Amino acid sequence: MLKIVQGFLGLLPLWFGIGFIAPLTAEIIKAFGWQANLPVSPLVVGLILGIAWGGSTVVRGRWI
């Protein structure tokens, strides 16, 4: 059980990227009216950005 919790917490930056950065980015895109220029949903763009940022944070071990 401890390994499962440690594994989940080790991926916390990735979960932050998916759960916070992705919806925030999607709402910013909608607020500025950029969704008409994008070929995909704003949430997809946010997920790509959030997963990339969170994944790189997990790999590097640093938030900044």
Image (tube, helix red, strand yellow):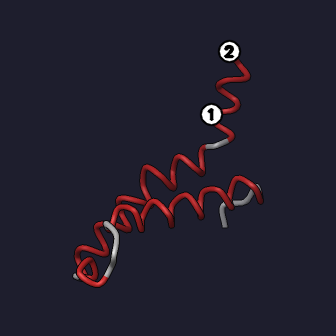
Please give the residue where the numbered disc 2 appears in the rendered image.
1
- Amino acid type of disc 2? Met
Mark 2 neighbour class, 10 Å CA radius: few under 14, some 14 to 19, many 20 or more: few
Q: Secondary structure at mark 1?
A: helix
Q: Secondary structure at mark 2?
A: loop
- Amino acid type of disc 1? Phe
The first of marks 1 and 2 along the sequence is: 2
The residue positioned 43% from the left and 49% from the top of the image is 19
11 vs 30, left or right, is right
Residue 60 in the image: x percent, y percent? 77, 59
9 vs 61, left or right, is left
Mark 1 neighbour class, 10 Å CA radius: few under 14, some 14 to 19, many 20 or more: few
Whether 2 is drawn above or below 29: the answer is above
Q: CA distance from mark 1 to mark 2?
A: 11 Å
Residue 44 in the image: x percent, y percent? 39, 62
Image quarter of the C terminus = bottom right
Please state which of residues 8 and 36 is positioned toward the viewer in this rendering: 36
Image quarter of the N terminus = top right
Whether 35 is drawn above or below 24: the answer is below
Please give the residue where the numbered disc 1 appears in the rendered image.
8
Residue 41 in the image: x percent, y percent? 31, 66
The residue positioned 59% from the left and 63% from the top of the image is 52
Instruction: Please tell me in which quadrant of the rendered image residue 4 appears.
Output: top right
Q: Which mark is residue 17?
A: none
Residue placed farthest to the front in the image? Answer: 39
